[in-house]
Every structure is written in structure tokens, then in C-alpha cells.
Image: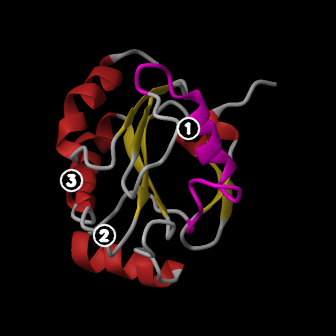
Amino acid sequence: MSQSIHNFQVNTIDGKETTLEPYKGQVLLIVNTASACGLTPHYKGLQHLYSTYKDQGFTVLGFPCNQFAGQEPGTEEEIKNFCDLNYQVTFPMFSKIDVKGENAHPLYNYLVENTPEPYRTGDIEWNFVKFLIDRQGNIIKQYSARTEPEALEKDIRQQLQKAE
């Protein structure tokens, strides 16, 4: 069976094992996050996108990561509380993972290796790198960490308009 984005095993921020199967048929934005980064305000834009488009079949999936300058040092509970208190995050958050290197989560290896040209960078350069996934689970684009969430709206709307 060929690998699908939906088959990857992940843990929710509450520690429950799951896969991305529940998100099948939705447009996804997968993001590696951090609470103490200059880009942390991206949470606000990500939450806005989620709130705006969730009823049309769009979901943001946040994966905290402490690999970049130690900018996500907290426990899952601390991360969850930070996101709730500071950004009222309601989109799904997952357990802290590595997104590059020998301990990188298989999901991130897959994302980096399977992003189509010309959007493939072959790397996760920092916190808040974003991957847009279509309803069938295909990787559409990888966006730089510095790309503001609002800049993705056109691409998200385009994917949402496509039939399942």
C-alpha cells in the first residue's frame, strides 16, 4: 500500500495515539509550532484561518517542536495552556516532535521528501513552516516559516473549492 498522509501515527497534545485518518477529505495546513519564537504570533493568523474555513472542510494541525533555539521547552500541558491563554487556539495540536534530523517524525520526513517542485525546499528551516495538503492527502505546497498565515488564504480557498 502506498503511503498516505492519513496513515501516519501521531499523538494528540493530550497524549492519545491516533492517525491523521480523521482528517481525510479535509484541506489541511500542517505547521511546526513554538511558543517562544519571534514567529509565535503566527498562532493568531493560523487560528483566524481555522475559524474562517473550518466549516468548509479546513483544519490546521499544529506540531510543537523544540529543535530551533530551544523555543518550545515546555511540556504538552504548558504548550496547550500557552496556546489557549495567549491565542485561543482551537485547532488540533499534537505532542512535541522533532521535524528534522535523525529523530524526525516520519510524517515530517514524508512532507519534506514529497513536496512537489517548485515548492520543495528539502528542509524545515525554522518554526512555523507550513504544508498545504489537499482533500485527497496530496501535498500541494510548502511555505517558508516567515510566510504569514494570511498569505495562504488564496491557496486554501482554491483547495476548498475543489470537489472531494
Residue 153 x %, y %: 21, 34
| Rendered residue at 65%/56% (across/down) | 10
Q: Earlier in the sequence, mark 1 or mark 2?
A: 2
- Crowdedness near tag 2: few (<14), some (14–19) or many (≥20) residues, C-alpha within 10 Å: some
- Report, in whole angstroms, how far the alpha carbon at label 3 lies from the one at label 2: 15 Å
Number of numbered tags placed on the structure image: 3
- Report, in whole angstroms, how far the alpha carbon at label 1 lies from the one at label 2: 22 Å
- Report, in whole angstroms, how far the alpha carbon at label 1 lies from the one at label 3: 23 Å
Residue pointed to by mark 1: 112
Residue pointed to by mark 2: 37
| Rendered residue at 25%/43% (across/down) | 147
Residue pointed to by mark 3: 45
Front one among 118 and 9: 118
> SS class of the residue under badge 3?
helix
| Rendered residue at 72%/30% (across/down) | 3
Quarter of the rendering occupied by the N terminus:
top right
Q: Label 2 sits on what residue type?
A: Cys
Say whether residue 135 is visible.
Answer: no
12 falls in the magenta region: no
**Quadrant of the image occupied by residue 87:** bottom left
> SS class of the residue under badge 2?
loop
Say whether residue 60 is visible.
Answer: yes
Q: Label 3 sits on what residue type?
A: Gly
Q: Is residue 121 above or below residue 17?
A: above
**Magenta span:** 95-119
Q: Label 1 sits on what residue type?
A: Val
Magenta span: predominant SS is: loop
Q: Earlier in the sequence, mark 1 or mark 3?
A: 3
- Crowdedness near tag 1: few (<14), some (14–19) or many (≥20) residues, C-alpha within 10 Å: many
Of tags 1 and 3, the one toward the viewer is 1
Q: Is residue 115 above or below residue 148?
A: above
Residue 133 x %, y %: 46, 32
